[in-house]
């Protein structure tokens, strides 16, 4: 099946007389005839459901659809993008381990790694995604367990060189994890470039309607844990908290990683999505391919409009020929990048603020990547405590506007921007 068809049909095939839609199985628990039947599930000897904190049929069907879209062998849904990135890393890197991450990542992920996971004893080295080979090589340590980056970074919009980072990770016997939230599997499939594990904040384009926060983790099934037995004891030696199961032996390359994340991390941290939320996510997934196409079409036209506007000082969009990342974007995302653009308004912080309050269609919101066009001016909102000098030092210019282009008619979006820029 092509991607458009998978958006509709993957993950669930109704049998005779069954519901057409992925059904909402809103039940905490599941009934069995004998305790032996249930025992087999607890021992991971049989497939099935016993408690929704660990697994739920609705969540699993939607996860299967996302796995099919990414071309992976196994996937799980979690309750947010934050939980997805935490589980994805913590599943293979724990106290005493080290991870290399790109500096160009979502601020929430940066805090998770640099503050909270450090408190848990995981060490991180952050590297510029455009660093030299020598710098990248120097970042690896004997206890490095993974490399992490974002296909298109939120909000800097840098494009990650997946193939290059995958090669470096594999040369050191560790997997590459890529957060593919902004590109979505419609525009980029990181597994085709050597990435081993993909994460998503499904809150963004996958849901796409401002309806539900969620996350997903997908395994390519390609990383050979047993070939690097000493590095990944959690997968390659018996789990005493699960009757001595060795995940990589029992579930193979295709299933070990997600089974371990479910059996240990979901069991212990409980970041389970509600089946109702997964149902809403599935509605978003059904139209993902057509929406992403429209987001990209609109964003390209808006970026070109901004680039030619006298009140705009700079435009950053990887789909523009003038972008430093245009060539890399063409390689990894030949059909389009995303709907998010950042740009500067001439006149700095004050002019940017006046621009914001003159918008009528675009809404001011701390959100990106959904059907509604929305804008954020970091200098007067998320970063308002900082001076102009401090803002510049952390790469958020005082005049910077983050614009998430929606799927309204592009002429209305441009007219709104034009009006506000003139104001
Ligand atoms: C929003 C976002 C996250 C965090 O996701 P939540 O669903 O808000 O927890 C992680 N990565 C990227 C790239 C994001 O845009």
Image: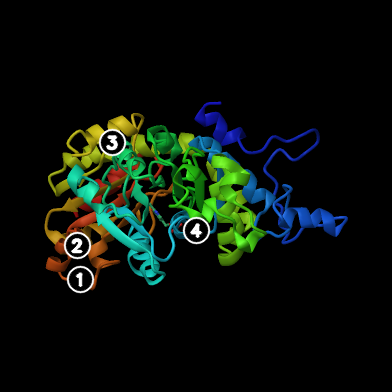
Q: Quadrant of ligand 1?
A: bottom left
Tell me the tag on residue 386.
1
Front-most of residues 240 and 137: 240
The reply to whether the C-beta atoms of the residues labelled 1 and 2 are less than 8 Å apart is yes
Question: Is 241 displayed left or right of 234 in the figure?
Answer: right
Res. 283 visible in picture: no
For discs 1 and 2, the disc positioned in front in the rendered view: 2
For the residues marked 1 and 2, what is the alpha-carbon distance in whole angstroms? 10 Å
For the residues marked 3 and 2, what is the alpha-carbon distance in whole angstroms? 29 Å
Is disc 1 surrounded by few (<14), some (14 to 19) or many (20+) residues within 10 Å? Answer: some
Residue ID for mark 2? 394
For the residues marked 2 and 4, what is the alpha-carbon distance in whole angstroms? 26 Å
Residue 336 screen position, x and y as percent: 34, 34
Screen quadrant of the C terminus: bottom left
Residue 29 screen position, x and y as percent: 75, 60
Of the numbered discs 3 and 2, the one sitting upstream in the chain is 3
Residue 406 screen position, x and y as percent: 39, 45
Q: Is residue 253 above or below residue 376?
A: above
Q: Secondary structure at mark 4?
A: loop
Front-most of residues 37 and 155: 37
Q: Residue at x 56, y 62 (%)?
A: 271
Q: Is mark 2 within 8 Å of ligand 1?
A: no
Residue ID for mark 4? 80
For the residues marked 3 and 1, what is the alpha-carbon distance in whole angstroms? 33 Å
Q: Residue at x 74, y 40 (%)?
A: 19
Q: Is mark 4 within 8 Å of ligand 1?
A: yes
Residue ID for mark 3? 301
Q: Quadrant of residue 275?
A: bottom right
Is disc 4 surrounded by few (<14), some (14 to 19) or many (20+) residues within 10 Å? Answer: many
Is disc 3 surrounded by few (<14), some (14 to 19) or many (20+) residues within 10 Å? Answer: some
Q: Residue at x 45, y 49 (%)?
A: 200
Q: Residue at x 37, y 34 (%)?
A: 193
């Amino acid at each position: 099946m092509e991607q458009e068809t998978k958006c509709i049909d993957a993950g669930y095939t109704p049998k005779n007389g069954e519901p057409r839609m992925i059904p909402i199985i809103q039940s905490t628990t599941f009934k069995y005839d004998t305790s032996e039947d249930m025992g087999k599930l607890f021992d991971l000897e049989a497939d099935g459901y016993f408690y929704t904190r660990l697994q739920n049929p609705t969540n699993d069907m939607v996860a299967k659809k996302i796995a099919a879209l990414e071309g992976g062998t196994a996937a799980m849904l979690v309750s947010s993008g934050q939980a997805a990135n935490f589980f994805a890393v913590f599943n293979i890197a724990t106290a005493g381990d080290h991870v290399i991450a790109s500096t160009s990542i979502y601020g929430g992920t940066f805090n998770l790694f640099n503050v909270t996971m450090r408190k848990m004893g995981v060490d991180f080295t952050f590297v510029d995604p455009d660093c030299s080979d020598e710098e990248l090589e120097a970042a690896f340590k004997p206890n490095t367990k993974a490399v992490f980056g974002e296909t298109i970074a939120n909000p800097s919009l840098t494009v990650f060189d997946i193939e290059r980072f995958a090669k470096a990770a594999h040369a050191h016997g560790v997997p590459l994890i890529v957060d593919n939230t902004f590109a979505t599997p419609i525009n980029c499939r990181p597994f085709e470039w050597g990435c081993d594990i993909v994460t998503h904040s499904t809150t963004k384009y996958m849901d796409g309607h401002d309806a539900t926060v969620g996350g997903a983790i997908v395994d390519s099934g390609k990383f050979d844990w047993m070939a690097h037995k000493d590095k990944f004891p959690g997968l390659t030696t018996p789990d005493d908290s699960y009757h001595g199961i060795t995940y990589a032996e029992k579930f193979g390359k295709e299933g070990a990683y997600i089974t371990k994340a479910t059996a240990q991390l979901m069991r212990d941290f409980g970041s389970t999505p509600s089946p109702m939320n997964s149902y809403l996510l599935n509605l978003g997934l059904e139209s993902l391919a057509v929406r992403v196409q429209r987001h990209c079409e609109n964003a390209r036209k808006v970026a070109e409009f901004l680039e030619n506007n006298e009140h705009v000082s700079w435009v950053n969009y990887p789909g523009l020929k003038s972008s430093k990342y245009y060539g890399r974007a063409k390689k990894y995302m030949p059909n389009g990048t995303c709907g998010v653009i950042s740009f500067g308004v001439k006149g700095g912080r004050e002019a940017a603020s006046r621009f914001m309050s003159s918008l009528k269609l675009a809404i001011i919101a701390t959100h990106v990547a959904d059907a509604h066009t929305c804008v954020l001016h970091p200098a007067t909102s998320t970063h308002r405590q900082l001076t102009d000098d401090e803002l510049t030092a952390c790469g958020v210019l005082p005049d910077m506007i983050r614009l998430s282009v929606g799927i309204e008619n592009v002429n209305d979006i441009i007219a709104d921007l034009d009006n506000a820029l003139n104001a």
